Image (cartoon, grey):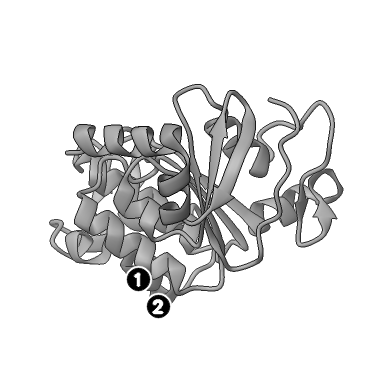
Amino acid sequence: MEDISFVTPAGQTIALVGPTGSGKSTIAQLLARLFDPDSGTIRLDGAALPELSRRAMADGAALVFQEAFLFDTSVRDNITLGGDFSEEEIESAARLAQAHEFILDLPEGYDTRVDERGMALSGGQRQRVALARALVRHPRLLVLDDATSAVDPAVEAAILAGLWRIDTTVVIVAYRRTSILLADEVIYIEAGQVVARGSHIDLYDRLPGYAALIDAYDVGAP
């Protein structure tokens, strides 16, 4: 990756789109500071990430992966991870993640125990619990790396529409037209470089490579 440079206004939803291996997930991991770039600076609200304490970074940014790891404990504890959150905050986060209704249908609701791989839950349900875990902390930056891949497209659209209404900057590694359409802006990446940015319609009309990729996503969509 080289010459990657972009500014995202606070509160916007940005979709990162590009072929496999283009660097989308690397950018997502850099934003959450899983590792630092060899050169250059990433800033959150004007502060360089290395200047932020671990606590400030944990409170300010959340990264949700495709593979949702759950602990061998209750759904509630998997959302709070020991944090001091009210019942209202927990349920509000679960509603945003489109998880509240299915959680209530579990044998013991939020107190239902799941194992480490969340085997009592479907893949889409695990992903929504993991998303609620991130949302309950009210991050200023939420990074979703294919974090709704196992969720039905209609449910995914409802999740992203809800995120669009809250005061959080959302960066999505996107693989579905439905999620891309809900973004305020699309950043198209090829071979580790930003090729273009703009609305989905603009990029689809003027970039054959982007259009072909989106059409391929549609063919492979569930």
Label 2: element kind: helix
**Residue under the image location 68 percent in, 25 percent down:** 1
User: Considering the image in quadrants, where does the C terminus appear?
Assistant: top left
Answer whether residue 98 is visible to the viewer in this image: no
Q: Answer above or below: position of 30 versus 45.
A: above
**Can you identify the residue that label 1 sits on?**
91
Percent across and percent down for residue 95 are 32, 69
In the picture as drawn, the residue positioned furthest to the front comes out as: 206
Q: Answer above or below: position of 98 versus 39.
A: below
Say which of 49 and 38 sits in front. Answer: 38
Count of numbered badges drawn on the protein? 2
Percent across and percent down for residue 143 are 53, 49
Q: Amino acid at mark 1?
A: Glu
**Residue under the image location 35 percent in, 33 percent down:** 212
**Residue under the image location 39 percent in, 43 percent down:** 147
Percent across and percent down for residue 117 are 31, 33
Answer whether residue 187 is visible to the viewer in this image: yes
Percent across and percent down for residue 106 are 15, 57
Q: Which mark is residue 88?
A: 2
Q: Amino acid at mark 2?
A: Glu
